[in-house]
Amino acid sequence: MNYRHRISTAITWAMGIVLVVASIGAGIFVYQLARATLIRQGQHEAVTIATAMQGRLAAEAKTHPGRTPVEDLGDMAAGQRYALLTTEAGTPIASSGTLPPVAPRQGWNQVIGTGWLNGSPAHSVPFVFTKIAVPLAHQVDELVVVDPLYRTAALLGILRSALLAGGAMLILSGVLAVIIIVKQLTDPLKELENEAQRITQIQPGSKNLLQVSTQFGEIRSLVDSFNRMLAQIFSAQEREREFLSNAAHALRTPIQVLTGYATSLSHWASPADRKQAIAAIVRESHAMTSLIDRLFELSRATMFDQCSLRPVFMAQWLHDKFPDFRDACMHHSLEYIGTEESDGVISCDPLLVEAILRILLENADHYATPDSPITLRLMVAPESVTIQVENLGQEISPDDAPHLFERFYRGHQPASSHHVGLGLSIADAMVQAMRAEWHLQSHAGKTIFGVRFIRLHHVSGLPSSAASYASFGESPSLS
């Protein structure tokens, strides 16, 4: 039995038991409420009858002082009613009518006020009784009147039968409704299961989503969640396929160059040709090394979300690290424009910031026009701190701009280019890990890649004197 059958069976049993218990409980409550109401009504009638008999006995005692009350009791105890007259001490004087099959444990002479008795096991009719004082001549006697509730018993029997029949119909209709509801609930789950099995059997590359028709909003929400998850899985698979294809293509070009030059090297007698082949081999080897390094960094991109963020005074940090960035900009002069702002503090991982700047500087060094400087700039605003890398050269086309941070995207770069299109993708993962954002400008022969951080205020433990960093506002230049 699969999980759908287990769920439907469990729901059916649970709701069925709840319906049975609720029906029985409601029936018992209604029956007991009706029974208590009818008994109270019978007690009230018994008191009324006893009061009338009390007045009649007292009047007959005044009219006929020597007459025994037995005859009067016989006239008044009509039908199934029972009347008992006792002295105040409890000695029976006279009785009349049908003796009820049940009696109080302490006897009729000891009863007080008004009450009722259940019928005997062979007699299901309840009995109500009342005891009242009767003044006769020079003494006060006690009158007990017991009245069987035959009409009440008949009404209770009809009510009991109606409740049983209604309860049975309610249970049957409830179980039927539960079965219908469970079927409507589990059928979409079965359809969802079949759809999930179909998805697992489709050809790789297909992007079919789950199609389940249901009236339940919860199941529609579940299907939507599954579809969102499938869309992410399909997108990840597509990125993986593109990554593998692009990586294979990027590796194939330098390998072919290395193989061709290595094969031809032994056939070239000219020293100049040999020198050219060796230079090409070295160049392509460096390109493969750079590509492998980029692939290794990209494989660690999923770990950037665990970077160590801490407050950093960026003006001081850039001033200290600026000389180390020279090796990332080998073909152009590098300038730094700082700020006199004394509290440009951001929350970042300095190692990731350095890696981002090296990637941006290498790209700027590659794309900048000859003999033009590359500028590293720090800008501090009231709510943000921005680090920019600026180069002069051909601006980024509108067609290339949306794809800058895609893996292996190189625009119109040739296949043999040392830039394989991974640097900005890695930098983008680092920027997102530090919860920063890109600021890109490219127009009029100038391209600026900026990373904007949220500025921190009132951070203790960092220098706050503006004089200590006043010299940073100059623009040092290294050639």
Image: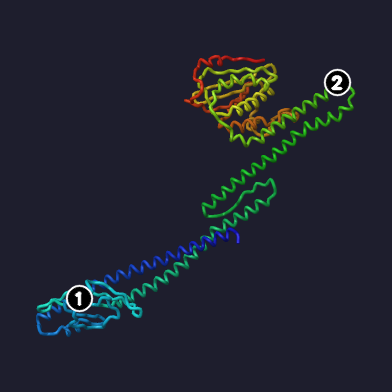
Q: Which mark is residue 272?
A: 2
Residue that appears at 77% across and 32% down: 253
Residue at label 1? 50
Residue 124 visible in image? yes
Numbered label attached to residue 3? none
| SS under mark 2 | helix
Q: Quadrant of residue 323?
A: top right
Q: Nearer the viewer, residue 313 or 147?
A: 313
Position of residue 347 measured from the top left corner of the image (x, y, whole percent): 54, 28
The answer to whether 475 is drawn above or below residue 118 in the figure is: above
Between the C-alphas of marks 1 and 2, the distance is 141 Å
**Of the residues shown, which amino acid type is indicated by label 1?**
Ala
Q: What is the three-letter code of the residue carrying label 2?
A: Ala
Taking 178 as reference, is 372 left or right?
Answer: right
Image height check: is 319 above or below 420? above
Residue 178: x and y, percent? Answer: 50, 62
Where the C terminus falls, by quadrant?
top right
Q: Residues within 10 Å of mark 2 (few under 14, many from 20)?
A: few
Q: For the N terminus, which image quadrant?
A: bottom right
Residue at 69% x, 23% y: name it. 366
- Pick the front one: 400 or 32: 32
Mark 1 vs 2, N-terminal side: 1
Residue 462 locus on image (x, y percent): 51, 23
**On the image, which quarter does residue 358 sit in?**
top right
